[in-house]
Amino acid sequence: MDLQRIQAALKSLDLEAWLLYDFRGANPIARRIAGLGEDRFATRRWFGLIPAEGDPVWLHHAIEAHLFADLPGRRVAFVGFRELQEKLRDLLRGVKRVAMEYVPGGSLPYVSRVDAGTVDMVRAAGTQLVSSADLVQGFEAVWSPEGLQSHLRAARGLKEVLQATFDEVTRAVRQGRSITEHSVQQFMGEQFQSRRLHFDPPIVAVNANAGNPHYEVRATGSSPIRRGDLLLIDLWCREEKEGSIWADITWMAWVGPKVPPRQQEIWDIVAGARDAAVAFLKEGIALGKKIRGAEVDTVARDFIRARGYADRFLHRTGHSIGLEVHGNGCNIDGLETIDERQLIPHTGFSIEPGIYLEDFGVRSEIDVYLDDRSVEVTTAVQDRIVPLLA
């Protein structure tokens, strides 16, 4: 646990303390901030008060003192529930305001991890709660220089797997060999494994299935892939080493020699929204502006709205990327959660607008990294739907 850095962050945000809380892994953020590894299993609830000045205090069950023995600060044990309440009141005596993984109204579920009953218990001790959302972003979403390099390597791996997949689909169709969404997904899994990349099963969707943003490929009932199909592939991975940063992209292909006008029209709108969001970011960051995630979402959404498809853009424009593919930093979201947090340097996220119709859907996804005064698109940018049989 980087106590000095945490306390500096608390002072910069004018916060008295950060109150960490977890019960059986319900708040992985608290576990990571405290430095409790995934191999340290706690079966009882615990609190950790980290003040802006002074030593932390860990309030834990008596049978789990060993989990906190190596952490800096003082340890206080409890056994029964009433004793926990009393010692929590003692712990918070004189502390007027603490940050917790709590967001009013649950508007940011990535951060809002503390249950309502525990919130009640803290408030009953006479302490005001504020959200730790900005603190969390500073510790969970910021990439180290090595993290950035791991992300760039993962991005190259994604492009290799994507190209191998397009080649496989092209060969199969030309040869008259039967393939399905599921068989292509399995092929991609083999490609990831051969490159020693950690991955989740990718989305492989044709035609109407591509109109479902989170279409789930199943072994039975998976659609065949044939000439004249529109193909959407969404794939994400990271290196196997713990601490590696994910990369995440979505590309489109047409199983034929020429993309039809209708699909091309929708692609042009989606790609235009993507590029408008990136241009807004680049201009703002270069000028030193503070940009909120919801603002970037509005730029992409307004581009699509002006062309008549606002009701078919069914999700946020992008998500935080970090140690988890959907990370705990600022999302590019003015729709699902209204993320008013500022985008901060050395963080990454996706930009992935989409339009989803009854007979097909189109999405284009890239990853973006913010430096102190610049914006870097870290993944390959698709400039057109790929005609696989051209």
Image (cartoon, grey):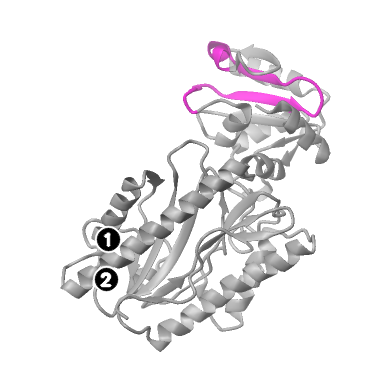
The amino acid pointed to by label 2 is: Thr
Q: Residue at x 59, y 39 (%)?
A: 113
Q: Relative to residue 353, is residue 213 drawn left or right?
A: left
Q: Is residue 224 visible?
A: no
**162 horizontally vs 143: left or right:** left
Mark 2 neighbour density, 10 Å: few (under 14) some (14–19) many (20 or more): many
- Snapshot quadrant of residue 83: top right
Identify which residue is drawn at 46% across, 77% down. 384
Give the residues drawn in magenta, as a range: 38-67
The residues bearing labels 1 and 2 have C-alpha atoms spaced at a distance of: 11 Å
The residue indicated by pointer 2 is 170
Q: How far across and how far down the image is residue 334, in percent?
A: 64, 63
Looking at the image, tell me whether mark 1 or mark 2 is earlier in sequence order: 2
Q: Which mark is residue 277?
A: none
x and y percentages locating residue 323 in the rendered image: 53, 42
Query: Is residue 120 positioned above or below 45 on the image?
Result: below
Residue 326, x across and y down, in percent = 52, 50
Query: Is the residue marked by circle 1 packed among few (<14), some (14-19), or many (20+) residues within 10 Å?
Result: many
Residue appearing at x 52%, y 71% in the figure: 313
In front of the other: 346 or 360: 346
Amino acid tagged 1: Val
Q: Which residue is mark 1?
A: 184
Circle 1/circle 2 CB separation < 8 Å: no
